[in-house]
Image (tube, rainbow, N blue to C red):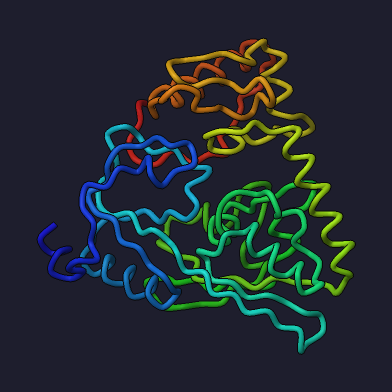
Amino acid sequence: MNKLRDVFGEALQENVPMSSYTTARVGGPVQGLLVVHSAAEMEKTIRALWDLEVPYTIIGGGSNVLVPDNGLRGVVVLNRAHTVKIDTNHTPPSVWAESGTILSALAHQVALRGLSGLEWAISVPGTVGGAVYGNAGAFGVDIAHSILLADILQQSGKETWSSQDMDYGYRTSRLKKTPTPTVILSAKFNLTPSSIEAIQAKMDANSAQRKNTQPPGASMGSIFKNPPGDYAGRLIETAGLKGKRIGGAEVSSVHANFFVNKENAKAADLYHLIRFVQSKVLEASGVQLELEVELLGEWPK
């Protein structure tokens, strides 16, 4: 910590509870927290952490992650880099956004310019970086369909990866599959001209569908990936697990693939509920549900 204090000074926040920065509202303290406000600041910060050989975790919107009650070692880099540049001078038009940009806000911005292509993202939680990393998607569309390029930082230098370079699959990417340290700095997305009214109508319909099918309150988003040819929510519901509670964590009665922090749940409550549901679904249907959320830190085997 002394080396971190020497390098980052007052920018380093210490022993910060991660429950303030996750959508599930759970998670213990991290040793150090650094907030970055631009891609350039992200690069400078990550390079300094690499030089110090300090473990780090990048957090954007805080969805799709579960932080343990005993917290995280090292540093959390809170990504607030959100510069957006819309290009209408070329055909087709496009938008470039730093990785800390909230994805739904980006969808709003391009819609106001009469540019279509991100309507599916209007109610997807999280940031551009998280979405690019995990190939986020909704309503039959995902990042793989939209992205043109991504600016990637590696220890060897900066590179620009095409959508083909990202090696996208269902809720996965080359970034998820590689052990080499990589950081998403920004991304560029394809758009098409349309009327503001038509775009808004599609976004309104998507938002309404989400509101009717997904629970309000603190959650991580979808807990499990959908298995081939089926839906995780259906399998959980068929196993009779809607409304199942462990501590303050509950399988949503609205959508069974969402676990809600109902009454000051602990991260351990959500973790044990995840494992319980996996075991019961395997017992009932023979399907081993695969996590979509990422377990950060250390957990029981």
Image height check: is 56 above or below 279? below
Image quarter of residue 173? bottom right
Image height check: is 150 above or below 282? below
Image quarter of residue 143? bottom right
Q: Nearer the viewer, residue 147 or 194?
A: 194
Q: Nearer the viewer, residue 112 or 130?
A: 112
Q: Residue furthest bottom?
A: 89
Residue 249 location (% of width, % of height): 48, 22
- Residue drawn at (70%, 20%) of the image: 235
| Horizontal relation, residue 48 to residue 291: left or right | left
- Residue drawn at (57%, 59%) of the image: 102
Q: Residue furthest left?
A: 2
Image height check: is 301 above or below 200? above
Residue 185 location (% of width, % of height): 49, 70
| Horizontal relation, residue 76 to residue 110: left or right | left
- Residue drawn at (26%, 71%) of the image: 48
Residue 58 location (% of width, % of height): 40, 56
| Horizontal relation, residue 208 to residue 32: left or right | right
| Horizontal relation, residue 221 to residue 191: left or right | left
Image quadrant in which the N terminus is located: bottom left
Q: Nearer the viewer, residue 13 or 223?
A: 13
- Residue drawn at (22%, 47%) of the image: 15
Image quarter of residue 49? bottom left
